[in-house]
Each structure stands twice: as structure tokens, then as C-alpha cells.
Amino acid sequence: MCWTLRRVLADFSEAPFFGNELASLGLLLGLLLAYVLAPGAPAYGSHLVLELVAGQALASLTGIVLWKRQWVARGWYPTYIPIVSIVPAAILTLGGSWQVIVLSAGIGALLAPPLAAAISARLPAYMHGYIGNVLSMAISTLSIVPLIGLMVGDA
């Protein structure tokens, strides 16, 4: 349980800081401070900061629980992908309703990490594995966000 919660926190800083929960804590505290000082400033003025963070945390938790065996077997798994791509894109595009939050977190956590792992595993040795993660972000976001829009009636 402790590892899972630390990992959820670390997922917030996986891309820029290699998954450090202290860096994530600083990142989130800075975001919340910015939100308190000027609620319209963060998140492109959308006023969806709390919805974004909630969706990102849900996506991370869902991905870590779903893919814990992969974490154990590989030592690392790209569960951060939906929190940096799918969830923010869906919420900023379709709004912060609970349906958008839950669907983007759930579908993103289910599909994006294994897609990234599959792409990265097939890359030539001279290419960095992060390329697979970025391709997964692009493919997942381009396919999942419109699907959610159809599901919630906003597309």
C-alpha cells in the first residue's frame, strides 16, 4: 500500500524528474499555491486545476493497480503516460465532468502503458525507449479523447 501511494505521487514527476515523489510533492504544492493565488492562471485559465489533479491521480492509481505485475517483473512501467497526456487533453477539451475524469483516467490507464511498452520493445537498439512512450501519448490521446467525447456527447 505504501509503495502504491508513493508511486502514484512519483508518477506526477516521471517525465521531468524520473519519478521522484519529493519532486512531485514540490510540483503539486507549487501548483496548489499558484491556484490559491490566482485560480485562473494555472491550466491555461480553464479553472480546472482540481479536476486535472484528481483525474491524474486517479489515472496513476488505476494504472499502478492494473499494471503492478509489470512493475514487479520489469522494475518500471510507463503508468505516467495518461497523467501527462490523455487526462489533461480530455479535461481541457471536454470539460471537467466526473464522466470525463473517470473515463480518461480509466481508459488511459488501461491502454496507454501497454501500448508504450509494446512500441518501446520493438524499437531498434539505437533509439531511446522514451520514443515509444511519446508515440503512445500521441496515439492514445488522438484516439481516446474523441472516443470519450462520443461517450459523453461532447464531440
Image: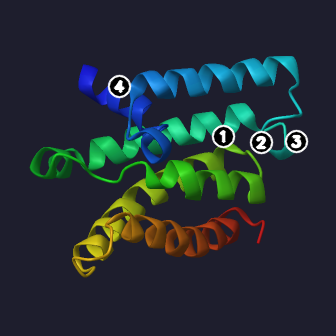
For label 1, the residue is 52
Q: Where is residue 57 in the image (x, y as percent from the top left)?
A: 50, 35
Q: Is disc 3 in contact with disc 4, using a CB cutoff of under 8 Å?
A: no
Q: Earlier in the sequence, mark 1 or mark 2?
A: 2
The residue at the point 24 percent across, 80 percent down is: 122
In what quadrant of the picture does the N terminus appear?
top left
For mark 4, does the 10 Å Cα neighbourhood hold few (<14), some (14 to 19), or many (20 or more) residues? some
For the residues bearing labels 2 and 4, Cβ distance under 8 angstroms: no
Mark 1 vs 4: CB contact within 8 A: no
Identify which residue is drawn at 49% across, 54% down.
82
Q: What element carries label 4?
A: helix
| First in residue order: circle 2 vs circle 4 | 4
User: Disc 3, disc 2: CB below 8 Å?
Assistant: yes
> How far separated are the C-alphas under marks 1 and 2?
8 Å
Q: Distance between the residues labelled 3 and 2?
A: 5 Å
Task: Tell me what residue is drawn at x 44 percent, y 21 percent.
Answer: 22
Side of 59 where 87 appears, left or right: right
Q: What element carries label 2?
A: helix
